[in-house]
Amino acid sequence: MLSENRGTFLYIRLRTKISVHGLDNIVGQLEENLISSKDLNDIVQLVIHHQLACEILEEHKSLALFSGMEQMAYRGKFQEYDRKVMSLQRELVAYKASRTKSPTGNSTGKVGEYTELSLIRHNLNLKKPRVALRSLIKRASVSMQALKPCFMMSPMSVAQYLEPGKFQFDLVIMDEASQIRPEDALGAVARGTNLVVVGDPKQLPPTSFFQKITNNDDSDDVVALEASESILEAVIPMFKNRRLRWHYRSRHESLIAFSNYRFYDSDLILFPSPLKESDEFGIRFRRVKKGRFISRRNVDEAREIVGATAKQLIENPTESVGIVAMNSEQTDEIERQLEQKVKDDPQLQKAYEYNQGLDEALFIKNLENVQGDERDVIIISMTYGPETLEAAAMHQRFGPINSDVGWRRLNVLFTRSKKRMHIFSSMDSGHVRTSENSSRGVVALKAFLEYCETGLLQHYNHTGKAADSDFEISVMNALAEYGYECEPQLGVTGYFLDLAVKDPGMPGRFLMGIECDGASYHSAKSTRDRDRLRQDILENLGWKIRRIWSTDWFKNPQAQLQSILQELDRLKTLVSDVADEAPARIELNLERQHVDLDLFDGVPGPIDLKSEPQSVNLALSDEVETHLSLHDRLINYDTTVIRSKFPSVDLHSRLLRPAMLEALLNFIPSSKAEFLETIPAFLRQGTDVQEAGEYLENVLEIIADYS
């Protein structure tokens, strides 16, 4: 009883104390079970902050009178007036320009002596003006600047057409300044009072291909301007700089995510798209499995790109399209195949003609000259790849990407699209081998392919460091006995993987990371870092992580290896035997009724063959092994198919006579366009028209299939 009274007394005393401090309302709510004791702390915090807010509003009357609806009305008015001011400013500029009087100049005597406005009016009335542009600008300089106060010209045009001393501008703006050499820019700079230089130091510098190479003596002083690769680089340390961080070209963040991370240190401000990646937005990656890189061209990759471009032009005619290849030879190949496809397909021809009438028509360019362009859809031909289908590895020659500024070329390429980017590649990321000595461009190329394949921004660095312990060396040596090469101390987002196991079939790809309980394990700051977070981060980046404990390895290394080897065998790239995959019989339905006589110069036509559709064995019988050479396949097709249909054709005019066969094997044409370009005219003219009209496309398909 005493205990109960004491408890009641304590409760009353505590309740009174709390009520004195203004919390009696809360106490009453608790007693009536209107609030829960577990929410008490949050409620007290709410009461305190509410009271503070009330005191602030009491002190600042303007805040107390604030109305959201009223503020929204103010915002609407501001937006309206801001747009009106911009419009009025344009009108003001136009008005001031119109008030500038153009001098009449000389309008009498010989036409060659006309000047200023008189000269301009005289030439406006001529269907073919006879005065050269340079002479016109020189003789009518004041009038031209009065009529058109804003000139848009290249630096070379400024030097060529604007005579020094006759033109002076209030403001000179240089865009794409990273591509303007300082010596080319000086003439334009000298003609202005103020200068604004706009450019991206992470994009292409001026080309130096045609620049004369001079050897300066060591004693010569080099001016800073001469040492700068562009006018942008020259002015950055001298002028006040302003970074334009907003990126608004890409309508989906995935299109700029790679460049933002890889080249801009994730510093660009991206505006999130309200739409997820769909058929309209994002990155599309297509692996061209049969693509091969021969004589600086990839014919199969070009063929797939042309097919995708045709589909794009027909199905999405209002979208702008650009195609970019890695070299000029591949650009020529794509142009040639597209031109042929446009000729062969009336529907595509109509779509192509419509596209050419758009403000942003289709372009086909190489990596070197795409800066400044943008399109809704950018189609990229990676171009490079293995030289044969049997090869798992490939030459590490990537043209301009290997150079010091190769990464800047890739940055330009990867930031051209507004809606979609379609990548066609004959190589995987694993085909690209990188090390600590690799150029930044090659590293970026490999990383971009990994991004396309996985959707993850892979990031690791080759450190070139040796293994951390004898334990790791022992594991490396044991795996090497089974054909697996390891790279020690591979850097990944601030960590170092103890061992990264390379794919034996594709050395540029890593199959697995193996962690050993060495120095990096014991140096972790906490158990959480060491035993959970580190592995979670690596696995989220796409790594498969396995761990080997030194004690277990000491007791029984083979037992530790077995499960790892089994998984590595499942993960590694198998070098496919193409001969085993090739079909023994290829059946095609032939419905060719006319010969394309443009392929055979000097032959009148067309000729109607009136041939019935037939199923023909193009390649090999079941008894013939499919690993025959292309020469043997063509001979087999000639003897089993062509000669059975046309037995009486003269041997010297047959489609697959020895001279033609030699030319086909030499040039490997796999399309009509290639046949017309590569096969000499005398061979085409000497070929029997009916035999060629019936079977030429079949022969080209055999060549393409074999390739």
Image: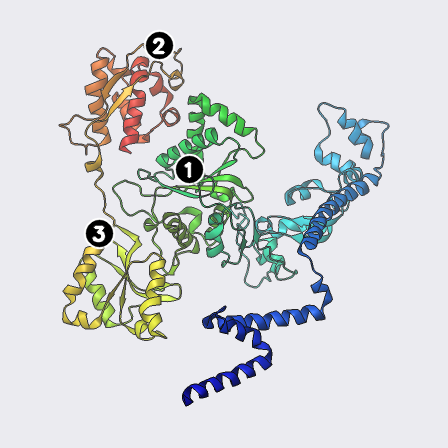
- Name the amino acid type tagged 3: Arg
Q: Is residue 605 at least partly visible in the picture?
A: yes
Q: CA distance from mark 1 to mark 2?
A: 36 Å
**Mark 3 lies on residue:** 570
Badge 2 marks a residue whose secondary structure is loop
In the figure, is residue 276 to the left or right of 609?
A: right
Task: State which tag comes first along the sequence, 1 or 2.
Answer: 1
In the rendered view, tell whether residue 227 sits above or below residue 51.
above
Circle 2 residue: 608
Label 3 secondary element: helix
Residue at image coords 24%, 15%: 651
Measure how far apart labels 3 and 2 are at the Cα level. Answer: 56 Å
- Front residue of 418/334: it is 418
Q: Is residue 440 left or right of residue 19?
A: left
Question: Marks 3 and 2: which is nearer the front?
Answer: 3
What residue is shown at x 36% (from left), y 58% (from top)?
Answer: 541
Q: Nearer the viewer, mark 1 or mark 2?
A: 2
Q: Quadrant of residue 121?
A: top right
The circle drawn on residue 330 is 1
**Residue 253 spot, x, y in % from top left:** 49, 49
Residue 509: horizontal and vertical position, in percent?
31, 53
The mark tally for this picture is 3
Q: Earlier in the sequence, mark 1 or mark 3?
A: 1
Residue 19 versus residue 634 in the image, above or below: below
- At horizontal 41% and vertical 88% (from top left) the residue drawn is 3
